[in-house]
Amino acid sequence: MHESTDVRRWLDSGARAVKHARERLDAINVFPVADSDTGTNLYLTLHEGNRAVAKLGADASHREVVAAFARGSLVGARGNSGVIISQYLTGFLSAIDAHGGLGRVDAHGIAQSLERAADAAYRAVGTPVEGTILTVARAAAAGAQRAMERGAGRDATLVAAVEEGRAALVLTYEQLPLAKEAGVVDAGAAGLMLQLEMLAETLGGPTVLDSLDRVEWEVTDVGATRISHVHHDRGGTYEVMFVATSREDIHASLTTDLEALGDSVSVTGSHDLWQAHVHTDSPHLAVARGIEAHARQIVVRNVRVGHDADRASTGIVALTQCPGLAEPLADAGAIVLVVPDPTALKRRALRRAVKDASGVAAVVVAGHPALRAAADELARKRRKPALTVLESQHEAQVISAVAAAALVTPGQDLADEMAGAVAATTVGQSTGDALDDDVDRLVDSATEVVSLILAAGVPDSVADAVRLSVRAASPDADVNVYRGEHAYPGVLIGVEHAPT
């Protein structure tokens, strides 16, 4: 048996276990926000890690498998739970590798590796909260340590870890107020237990846990059916995630800065890559921090919008180079991918945004020709989710398309309505000095909406003269001003006309 066989088997079985339990985990998700996506986030994170491992040859060493999974899961981490599980597993696998690999590790190595993993999970979180995945990680490590000290072998040490972890999982119902209110255990902690259970079965065999009592995730009959629709007031409205590259340790500075902007902050690092996550009411500031950290693409979504339901229908992905547009686009239901340099968009990041938007189909609308070209290339190579890439190449067309999507009613085709909005939007740009004249050339009596997207440093007052001239040409037209906060040009212009 090859040295990496056991670790590959475990990582694969762990991902499959979460995939099987994905809907149940989503249903019991109440912390930090009841947005019904913990199972999905955990699965997609693990899937990306295993996808990186699958690219290795069959003869890849244990260390190569560990490194590939660590990098893949970190870059592909979704949500707070995904960031934490990525760091937990990376910490565990790195420690196991130092003990000779999963197939050779003894009881002492298991106990020490579980402790390292728990430490890594705690480090990933800016403000740790007990009664969550962190508490269960620590309990499992403590159970393994006690068993090892009693002279237990490797398999028995793992069984003890699972037993203590399950006991701690039950207690999350009491420790976490949101979980108790909903009548469930913590979803992230339940997902972690699936990983530990699969680890025990990988090394000890499929019956090694048969003597232990199982844990019910729905503790009372309050009902997971209502959980997915409850949104508590705690936490920020927007989730912002990005991956930065730095050879320096930016964990402390990034954590401090993001904690000043919101909560549910987690920052993890591996192989000069840093994955950051925050829930915030100021997404533009979190996006700006990501740009400062040289993040090439930043994902923003509104956690109050029901993306859990969208996964069974057609989702929307908005690609923009304007940091300031993340908030209004996310409010309209889009998964927003902010790409400050459109030529630097990675297909991996686009693929991730598409997966986040829907498991079935997605409409992609891009605000720059290079972003649209990347979307077209991905659409040619993917079958699921099915992609429709709109004929857009301007930020104002992104705004009009996403706005149209928010007004779609049952029976209307989402892609058709969005495409119609793009076609009805005439676009242009201005330095700002001659903005009134530049808009006048685009406006006529059929104009319904004028959108002005202002670059960083351009004052809102530049729109004052535009409002007067638009009113003269089309009295009922609206003039909407957006802070794009991009670098150039000074003002992006979009004019929407009534259908003829």
Image (cartoon, rainbow, N blue to C red):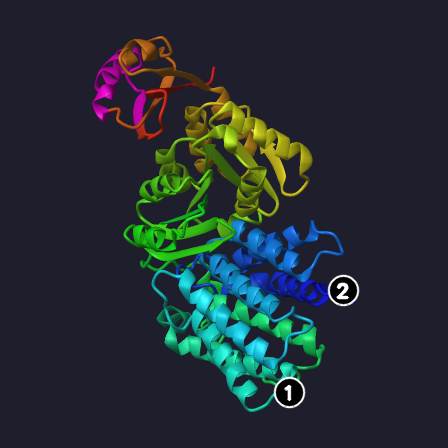
Q: Is residue 243 left or right of residue 70?
A: left
The amino acid type found where label 2 is placed reads His
In the displayed structure image, the side of residue 252 where residue 296 appears, left or right: right
- Main secondary-structure element of the magenta-colored stretch: helix
- Cα distance between the residues tagged 1 and 2: 31 Å
Q: Which quadrant holds residue 64?
A: bottom right
Q: Which residues are magenta?
A: 459-481
* Residue at the limit of the structure toward the bottom, as seen here: 150
Q: Along the line of sight, which residue is nearer the eye, 66 or 482?
A: 66
Visible residue check, residue 334: no
Q: Residue 460 colored magenta?
A: yes
Q: Residues within 10 Å of mark 2 (few under 14, many from 20)?
A: few
Q: Judge depth for marks 1 and 2 and give the one in front.
A: 2
**How packed is label 1: few (under 14 Cα within 10 Å), some, or many (20 or more)?**
few
- Looking at the image, which residue is at 45% across and 65% down? 121
Q: Give the residue at mark 1.
A: 211
Q: Amino acid at mark 1?
A: Ser
Q: Which callout, 1 or 2, points at the residue further toward the start of the chain?
A: 2
Q: Looking at this view, is 161 or 41 the one in front?
A: 161
- Total number of numbered discs in the rendering: 2
The local secondary structure at tag 1 comes to: loop
Residue 70 lies, in percent from the top left, at 56, 56
From the image, which quarter does the N terminus lie in? bottom right
**Dot 2 corresponds to which residue?**
2
Res 485 quadrant in image: top left
Q: Is residue 393 magenta?
A: no
Residue 408 spot, x, y in % from top left = 48, 36
* In the image: residue 283, left or right of residue 364: left
Q: Position of residue 174 (x, y in %)?
A: 39, 78
